Amino acid sequence: MTARLTDAERRELTATLRKRRQTLGAEIAHKVEAQDNPALLTLRNRMEETDDWAVADLETALDIAEVSRDTVELREVDAALTRMRDGTYGDCVECGQAIPYARLAANPSAARCIACQERAEAALRRGPPASL
Ligand SMILES: [Zn+2]
């Protein structure tokens, strides 16, 4: 059984999560704002005039992909902060084993121990089960 987190470790991870949350929030706000950026609008108008829709569509798609990557991470950080408040932070959401501090220090929003994370990722790669 891996040792539970100490209070100091917990405080440090909470601070890291809060800081990450702020950074992500600012990044998302900035990117969403950029969607209405006059320069981007000018570019879009030019694309419409030149009928170069493919590029305009591609650019919009890229912007959205970047924003959604950030929102996915923000959700993970939020979930980690909720677990911190619940007192379940640091326990694997799958098997309940304590997640080692080294793993949390590298990835404070980690919800699973390495074994469960690898299983979850392998399942994702395989895709959904054929029959369920
Ligand atoms: Zn686990």
Image (cartoon, rainbow, N blue to C red):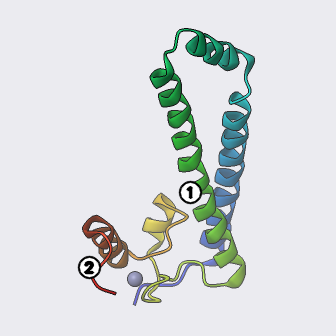
Label 1 residue near ligand 1, CB within 8 Å:
no
Between circles 2 and 1, the one closer to the viewer is 2
Q: What whole-number distance in Å separates the C-alpha atoms at marks 2 and 1?
A: 26 Å
The residue at the point 69 percent across, 19 percent down is: 41
Secondary structure beneath label 1: helix
> From the viewer's perspective, is 65 left or right of 10?
left
Residue 113 percent coordinates (x, y): 40, 76
Residue that badge 2 annotates: 130
Q: Residue at x 56, y 32 (%)?
A: 60
Label 1 is placed on what type of residue?
Val
Q: Quadrant of the C terminus?
A: bottom left
Drawn side of residue 17 relative to residue 93, left or right:
right
Displayed-image quarter of ligand 1? bottom left
Graded by Cα atoms within 10 Å as few (under 14), some (14 to 19) or many (20 or more), the crowding at tag 1 reads few
Q: Do residues under tags 2 and 1 come within 8 Å of each other at their CB atoms?
A: no
Q: Tell me the quarter of the picture where residue 44 sits.
A: top right
In the picture, measured across the screen, residue 33 lies left or right of residue 95, that is: right
Q: Of helix, strand and loop, which one carries label 2?
A: loop
Q: Residue 72, which numbered label?
A: 1
Residue type, numbered disc 2: Ala
Q: Residues within 10 Å of mark 2 (few under 14, many from 20)?
A: few
**Quarter location, residue 34:** top right
* In the rendered image, the vertical position of residue 44 relative to residue 71, given as above or below: above
Which mark is drawn over residue 8? none
